[in-house]
Image (spheres, grey):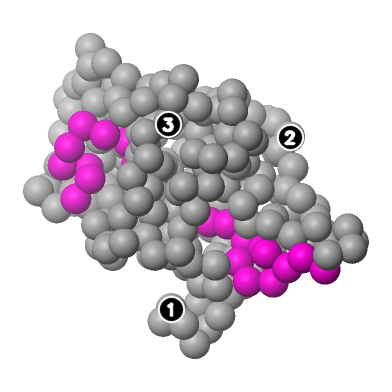
């Protein structure tokens, strides 16, 4: 396996503004929903009482339910938002893999954002220290299509940023799978006391955990684990993943 590295200093993704497809005149047809896609769809009632097209994927640890959305060019794509990829067991501790679950987990809304600097340009309203979530965006694939290349986007710098701030509307007009991630920030992600009590760089370890989750699960989303490109914005650590021995075996 290998890693293609691309470090971008500008914003390619744009804001997260995808539109959920509701049960109205612009919805996909029953024929599209049941025959022409690799991901069969059903109408599901949301918490607000509106119906929306959803689909279920079975991953290594259990089943996830995602929603059908529209790209910039009005193409259908499937979003799995708020997918937890690792567990934070305690402040300043390394994250650990998740245990399997039995029921279907909804991945219809973004997960918690990591606590961060609130004066650095983002409006942060839904934070929690257990914040290791990612978002998977898949074009509407036909059953005969091959597995797609995968791009993993690492947002922003060490003090602020969240994967939910960057959408998939442009990427989903192409044949590529996009994954955006959260990782711990500021002192929660990078404090090092120098005496072994707080070893530091947990934010970087979170990125490794996200990369391993992609390697182990992206096939279930029709992604190709040997074609992964990692890139990011500003102070993101795409270069770290290329250099770190911890990435070996996941790429």
Q: Residues within 10 Å of mark 3 (few under 14, many from 20)?
A: some
Horizontal and vertical percent position of residue 202:
69, 55
Q: Does the stretch in magenta take in 191?
A: yes
Residue at horizontal 37 percent and vertical 60 percent from the top: 233
Q: Which label sits on residue 122?
A: 1
Q: Does the stretch in magenta take in 122?
A: no
Which mark is in front, 2 or 3?
3
Alpha carbon distance from label 3 to label 1: 30 Å
Q: Residues within 10 Å of mark 1 (few under 14, many from 20)?
A: few
Tell me: residue 153, above or below residue 124.
Answer: above
Residue 39 in view? no
Q: Residues within 10 Å of mark 2 (few under 14, many from 20)?
A: few
Q: To which residue does mark 3 refer?
A: 3
Secondary structure of the residue carrying tag 3 is strand
Horizontal and vertical percent position of residue 130:
69, 59
Secondary structure of the residue carrying tag 2 is loop
Q: Earlier in the sequence, mark 2 or mark 1?
A: 2
Alpha carbon distance from label 2 to label 3: 27 Å
Which mark is in front, 3 or 1?
3
Residue 116 in view? yes
Q: Residues at badges 3 and 1 in contact (C-beta under 8 Å)?
A: no
Alpha carbon distance from label 2 to label 1: 32 Å
Q: To which residue does mark 2 refer?
A: 99
Which mark is in front, 2 or 1?
1
Q: Earlier in the sequence, mark 3 or mark 1?
A: 3
Q: Residue furthest top?
A: 144
Q: Earlier in the sequence, mark 2 or mark 3?
A: 3
Which sits in the foreground, 32 or 76?
A: 76
Horizontal and vertical percent position of residue 172:
22, 42
**Residue 75 sits in which quadrant?**
top left
Which sits in the foreground, 69 or 145?
A: 145
User: Magenta stretch?
Assistant: 170-193
């Amino acid at each position: 396996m290998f890693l293609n590295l691309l470090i971008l200093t500008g914003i390619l993704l744009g804001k997260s503004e995808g539109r959920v497809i509701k049960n109205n005149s612009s919805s996909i047809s029953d024929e599209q929903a049941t025959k022409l896609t690799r991901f069969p769809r059903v109408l599901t009632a949301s918490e607000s009482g509106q119906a929306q097209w959803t689909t279920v994927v079975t991953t290594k640890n259990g089943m996830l339910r995602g929603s059908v959305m529209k790209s910039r060019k009005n193409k259908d794509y499937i979003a799995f938002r708020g997918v937890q990829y690792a567990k934070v067991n305690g402040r300043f501790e390394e994250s650990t893999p998740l245990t399997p679950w039995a029921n279907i987990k909804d991945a219809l809304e973004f997960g918690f954002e990591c606590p961060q600097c609130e004066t650095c340009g983002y409006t942060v309203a839904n934070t929690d220290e257990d914040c290791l979530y990612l978002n998977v965006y898949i074009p509407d694939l036909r059953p005969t299509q091959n597995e797609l290349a995968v791009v993993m986007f690492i947002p922003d710098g060490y003090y602020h940023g969240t994967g939910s701030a960057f959408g998939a509307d442009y990427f989903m007009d192409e044949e590529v799978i996009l994954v955006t991630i959260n990782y711990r920030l500021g002192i929660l992600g990078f404090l090092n006391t120098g005496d072994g009590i707080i070893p530091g760089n947990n934010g970087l370890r979170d990125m490794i955990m996200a990369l391993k989750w992609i390697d182990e699960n992206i096939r279930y989303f029709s992604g190709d684990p040997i074609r992964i490109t990692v890139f990011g914005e500003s102070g993101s650590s795409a270069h770290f993943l290329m250099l770190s021995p911890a990435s070996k075996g996941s790429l």
